[in-house]
């Protein structure tokens, strides 16, 4: 990764709405270089999406989240990838990770209600033939996501003017 | 009751800091974006804070040796040698102080006698001249010019020397200008320092904040200057540790012994928890290649570029600073004085900046803006300043 790529990723990670002109000034690169680099990072699928971090708890949308530990039987030649693909295709699934340790896949699931989520686990996930066991934990409260503290984060305590 | 008879008139006559007056005004205003701060917007990295927490949990709440915890002094010695190539003995040549400010005060009080002159390049940090006066000396400002990138030039230094000159304060990287002195610049003034038999108090508190491929050179590393230099540094700026109040002075044992005498009777020791955190900052840095410092520096550098470019596109003359975290644009084009500009900017646009004349008379015509603030806030502040500058007819 070049220094410019690294700087742009840092800046966009913090605020993906920064205009190209500002990104150019802040990285000391030309407008064209910045535009090309971002374009390339998108094409290479390094940058996948520009999305805000949302605190849904402050909205009136009903929503439950769970983390499901899944044990599976890996397939010959395919390893865990094929099973993971069977799982990540469900709309309810937000993230899937292959893990080291006492289970194989960690699946983050989102649904509108507890019932919806429960039926996803019992009807869709557990019934997959390669899934040998699941353990579901519900998210009770989100404190920090993507580096952002949701409430009561650290405020700026600095004096307005100091020498 | 009147206290005139009790007050020391020499001290009472020293005017309060120009910054203070402005602070009183600015802190009454709501929705102000402040570019007037003089400290990082980062919190102290959590592992450093955690080291202090653990030490408190373990009940480490006692005095430390006057000169500071020995293991901290050893880390300071390793840091200065590894980073800047200057070697000091942890036992006799390093003194841990309550911020770099105490170190400067001690150095002045240990060396200055009534009638002695101390050269203070300006614009510079507000407390040098008052500290010289408190020590009984006479501060002599030496003007540095934007045309010289606010560097101290040998001819200006030589012209300010008299028979009474004893000390030079060397404040680089500089607050408020962001100017730096590179190796060649320091080599150029070294012969003047030697010829006039001066001691140098080199305040290098911003040594880690130097940008665009430039590097910091310690004055003590210039041939012949080591015995003439008291090197002052600390943790506030590099490690975002302003509130911990830990700094240090390094130099010849004979001078450090006298400084320690004042420190031991007046202060006893820097707070233990601050020292523990400082030691962790250096040890961690040594082990991970100063990762925290590098991350913060990169972030400052991006904002530095944004500031310079924005002031220039407003039509103001803005010197490109390579050190610290300030820009020092000239606002002469607006026809306002520094104080008028900052006063109106605060009242009309709710942006606080510091008038340049707070840092010495020669700072008139400029303002100091700190860019240690989140990019989104900086952007709003710059837009407001641009509006104001346009109103002034630039």
Image: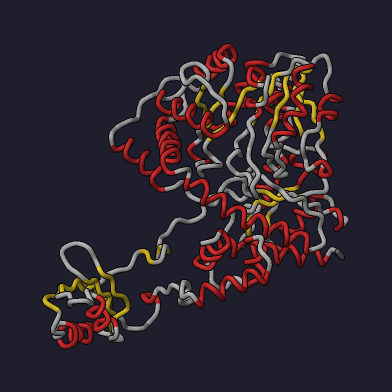
Q: Is residue A79 above or below residue B149?
A: below
The quadrant holding residue A66 is bottom left
Q: In this view, does B208 lie to the left or right of B271?
A: right
Q: Is residue B110 left or right of residue A48?
A: right
Q: Position of residue B358 (x, y in %)?
A: 74, 41
Q: Is residue A18 above or below residue B245?
A: below
- Count up the numbered dots: 0
Q: In this view, does B173 lie above or below A43?
A: above
Q: Is residue B337 left or right of residue B230?
A: right
Q: Position of residue A154 (x, y in %)?
A: 45, 56
Q: In this view, does A16 lie above or below B57?
A: below
Q: Which residue is drawn at 63% across and 59% down?
A: B33
User: Can the viewer see residue B3?
Assistant: no
Q: Position of residue A148 (x, y in %)?
A: 42, 64
Q: Where is residue B258 in the image (x, y as percent from the top left)?
A: 57, 13
User: Can the viewer see residue B121?
Assistant: yes
Q: Looking at the rendering, in which quadrant would you find the C terminus of chain A?
A: top right
Q: Which of B232 and B37 is in front in this view?
A: B232
Q: Which of B74 and A150 is in front in this view?
A: B74
Q: Which residue is drawn at 77% across and 29% down?
A: B188
The quadrant holding residue B275 is top left
């Amino acid at each position: 990764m070049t220094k410019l790529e690294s700087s742009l990723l840092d800046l966009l990670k913090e605020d993906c709405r920064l205009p190209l002109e500002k990104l150019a000034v802040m990285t000391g690169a030309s407008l064209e270089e910045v535009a090309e680099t971002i374009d390339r990072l998108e094409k290479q699928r390094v940058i996948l999406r520009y999305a805000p971090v949302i605190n849904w708890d402050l909205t009136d949308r009903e929503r439950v989240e769970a983390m499901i530990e899944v044990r599976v039987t890996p397939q010959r030649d395919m390893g865990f990838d094929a099973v993971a693909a069977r799982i990540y295709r469900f709309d309810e699934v937000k993230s899937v990770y292959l893990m080291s340790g006492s289970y194989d896949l960690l699946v983050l699931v989102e649904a509108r209600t507890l019932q919806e989520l429960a039926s996803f686990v019992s009807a869709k996930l557990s019934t997959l033939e390669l899934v040998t066991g699941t353990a579901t934990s519900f998210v009770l409260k989100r404190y920090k996501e993507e580096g952002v503290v949701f409430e009561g984060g650290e405020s700026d305590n600095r004096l307005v003017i100091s020498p | 009751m009147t206290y005139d008879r009790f007050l020391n008139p020499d001290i009472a006559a020293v005017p309060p800091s120009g910054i203070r007056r402005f602070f009183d005004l600015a802190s009454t205003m709501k929705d102000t974006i402040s570019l007037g701060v003089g400290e990082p917007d980062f919190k102290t990295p959590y592992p450093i804070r955690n080291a202090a927490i653990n030490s408190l949990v373990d009940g480490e709440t006692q005095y430390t040796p006057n000169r500071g915890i020995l293991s901290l002094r050893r880390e300071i010695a390793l840091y200065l040698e590894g980073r800047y190539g200057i070697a000091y003995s942890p036992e006799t040549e390093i003194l841990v102080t309550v911020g770099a400010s105490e170190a400067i005060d001690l150095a002045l009080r240990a060396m200055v006698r009534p009638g002695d002159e101390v050269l203070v390049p300006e614009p510079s940090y507000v407390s040098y001249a008052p500290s010289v006066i408190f020590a009984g000396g006479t501060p002599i400002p030496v003007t540095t010019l934007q045309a010289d990138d606010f560097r101290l030039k040998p001819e200006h230094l030589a012209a300010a020397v008299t028979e009474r000159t004893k000390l030079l304060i060397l404040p680089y990287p500089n607050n408020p200008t962001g100017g730096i002195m590179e190796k060649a610049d320091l080599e150029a003034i070294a012969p003047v320092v030697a010829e006039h038999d001066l001691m140098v108090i080199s305040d290098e508190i911003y040594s880690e904040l130097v940008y665009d491929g430039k590097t910091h050179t310690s004055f003590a590393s210039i041939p012949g200057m080591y015995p003439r230099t008291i090197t002052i540094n600390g943790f506030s700026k590099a490690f975002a540790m302003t509130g911990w109040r830990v700094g240090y002075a390094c130099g010849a044992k004979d001078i450090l012994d006298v400084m320690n005498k004042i420190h031991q009777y007046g202060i006893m020791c820097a707070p233990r928890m601050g020292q523990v955190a400082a030691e962790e900052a250096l040890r961690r840095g040594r082990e991970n290649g100063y990762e925290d410092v590098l991350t913060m520096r990169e972030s400052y550098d991006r904002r530095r570029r944004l500031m310079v470019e924005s002031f220039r596109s407003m039509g103001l003359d803005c010197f490109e600073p390579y050190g610290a975290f300030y820009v020092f644009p000239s606002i002469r084009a607006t026809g306002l004085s520094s104080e008028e500009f900052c006063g109106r900017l605060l009242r009309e646009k709710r942006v606080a900046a510091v008038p340049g004349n707070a840092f010495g008379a020669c700072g008139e015509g400029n303002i100091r803006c700190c860019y240690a603030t989140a990019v989104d806030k900086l952007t709003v502040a710059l837009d407001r300043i641009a509006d104001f500058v346009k109103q002034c007819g630039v």
